Image (tube, coloured by chain):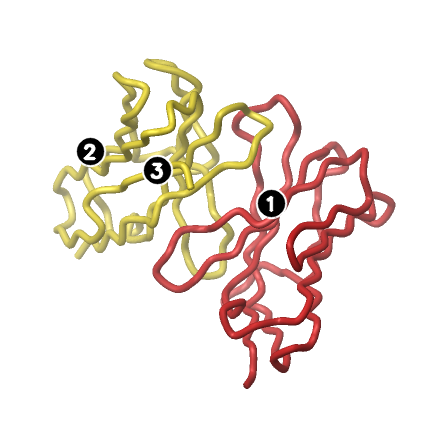
Chain colours: A red, B yellow
């Protein structure tokens, strides 16, 4: 999972396996959650979002799970590919409030051949 | 992507000099944001704008000012740069406050 510190948590997976990246969020009032992917030298790229009235949402090869009871969010990537290697981080926010995305520090995903 | 262009992409300058970073968007998004990204930290909000000439502070606004005279442009100014402002700066935009923010590719700023 994510933590604040000098070194990012890392996850290494074999190509073709599924990846699960975890995120603990802090604000029980947050009702909007986003996963971003950031490749080296690039800006964060939106992957998928979920609102608190859902506990699961699926996209193309990705699934986000939300557990509001324990304030936990996870991103599942199916059939992980080399192009999935990047830093992944979650963000939490409150609907209708413009300023409020709070970002985690991220997890480095490395896909092994 | 939201058509966000940041300039310059890289800049090296000296302590005490003024620096202005520019963010330009082509999507007509209402909200624009400036963040900084440092090792060991998530993205931290510096300032944001919710319309032309409407701006507000984020969590790390000291030493920074912003201006938004047109929908498409959001400027970040360091009036007198300090070494602690060495960072990667990202601009983001969103159509509404509860929609995903989309990011530019960043400006790497080094202050010597």
Q: CA distance from mark 3 to mark 2?
A: 27 Å
**Which of the chains bears the disc numbered 2?**
B
Checking the image for residue B79, the label placed there is 2
Q: SS class of the residue under badge 2?
A: loop
Checking the image for residue A8, the label placed there is none
| Residue furthest front in the image | A60
- Quadrant position of residue A74: bottom right
Residue A106 position in % (x across, y down): 56, 59
Q: CA distance from mark 1 to mark 2?
A: 30 Å
Residue A92 position in % (x across, y down): 64, 41
Residue B61 position in % (x across, y down): 39, 33
Tags 1 and 2 touching, CB below 8 Å: no
Can you say which quadrant of the picture contains the C terminus of chain B? bottom left
Q: Is residue B37 left or right of residue B67?
A: right
Quickly name the residue at label 1. A91
The answer to whether tags 3 and 2 share a subunit is: yes
**Residue situated in front as seen by the camera: B54 or A65:** A65
Q: SS class of the residue under badge 1?
A: strand
Disc on the earlier residue, 3 or 2? 3
């Amino acid at each position: 999972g994510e933590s604040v510190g000098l070194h990012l948590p890392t996850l290494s997976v074999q190509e073709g396996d599924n990846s699960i990246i975890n995120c603990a969020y802090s604000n029980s009032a947050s009702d909007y959650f986003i996963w971003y992917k950031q490749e080296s030298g690039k800006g964060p790229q939106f992957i998928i979002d979920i609102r608190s009235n859902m506990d699961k949402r699926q996209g193309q090869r990705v699934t986000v799970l939300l557990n509001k009871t324990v304030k936990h969010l996870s991103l599942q990537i199916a059939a992980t590919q080399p192009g999935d290697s990047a830093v992944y981080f979650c963000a939490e926010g409150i609907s209708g409030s413009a300023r409020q995305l709070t970002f985690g520090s991220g997890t480095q995903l490395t896909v092994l051949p | 992507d939201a058509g966000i262009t940041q300039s310059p992409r890289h800049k090296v300058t000296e302590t005490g000099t003024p620096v202005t970073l520019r963010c330009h968007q082509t999507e007509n998004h209402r909200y624009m944001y400036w963040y900084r990204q440092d090792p060991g930290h998530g993205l931290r909000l510096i300032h944001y704008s919710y319309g032309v000439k409407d701006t507000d502070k984020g969590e790390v606004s000291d030493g920074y000012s912003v201006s938004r005279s047109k929908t498409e442009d959001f400027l970040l100014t360091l009036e007198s740069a300090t070494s602690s402002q060495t960072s990667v700066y990202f601009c983001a935009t969103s159509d509404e406050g509860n929609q995903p923010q989309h990011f530019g590719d960043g400006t790497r700023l080094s202050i010597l």
